[in-house]
Image (cartoon, grey):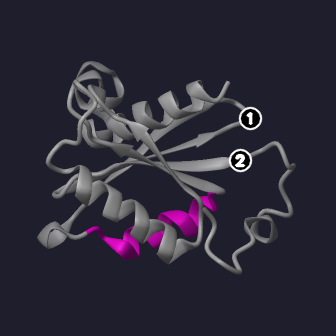
Amino acid sequence: MIAAGADIHDRTAHRPPSLQTLLGFDFGRRRIGVATGQTITGTATALTTLESPDGRPDWDAIAGLIETWQPDALVVGLPLHADGSDAGISGAARRFMRQLEGRFCLPVFSMDERLSSHAATRSGDATNRGVDAAAARIILQDWLDTRR
């Protein structure tokens, strides 16, 4: 999943090998929620919600978050219907994943995001960081939980 020639270990040589920082994304055409998490603690935290002007991701803002957080990998919520089939926005989310991988040379993982927005509206995070950032936290937390 790492682009040719990219070596993420060079960027993270100062970190213990077991510590991995992640950024999680709740992709939407108007907004993208962002969360951060660590594999060592197994926890995720809502960060922010980025606006998507003209339906395009704000790549400068995403690059700034990647520069600040120095993630080892990225996790993107994949919108699916209740039966597991693709939702209307699934193709756009997959394109976003490919663009992230190509632009930042980081491994990108998908996570089923069914019901994450619904759960986010009921969580305390939604009032503090917005529904999209809270949904990103839930997506990333679910990804972390499946790897324990």
**Figure check: 59 above or below 127:** below
Residue of label 1: 40
Q: What residue occupies the far top of the structure in this picture? A: 122
84 magenta-colored: no
Q: Nearer the viewer, residue 71 or 89?
A: 89
Vertical position of residue 71 compared to residue 55: above or below? above
Residue position marked by numbered label 2 in the rendering: 20
- Sequence-first tag of 1 and 2: 2
Q: Give the range drawn in magenta.
A: 57-71
Residue 139 shown left or right of residue 42 in the figure: left
What is the secondary structure assignment of the residue under circle 1?
loop
Q: Where is residue 136 in the image (x, y as percent from the top left)?
A: 38, 40
Q: Which amino acid does label 1 sit on?
A: Ile
Quarter of the image holding residue 77? top left
Query: Could you tell me residue 101's position as x and y percent?
Result: 50, 67
Looking at the rendering, which quadrant does residue 12 occupy? bottom right
- Residue 79: image tag: none
Viewer-closest of 106 and 59: 106
Residue at 81 percent across and 71 percent down: it is 10
From this view, report whether residue 48 is shown above or below residue 45: below
Left or right: residue 48 versus residue 86 is right
Q: In which quarter of the image is the C terminus?
A: top right
Which quadrant would the N terminus be assigned to in this image?
bottom right
The residue at 23%/25% (across/down) is 83
Residue contact between numbered discs 1 and 2, judged by CB atoms under 8 Å: yes
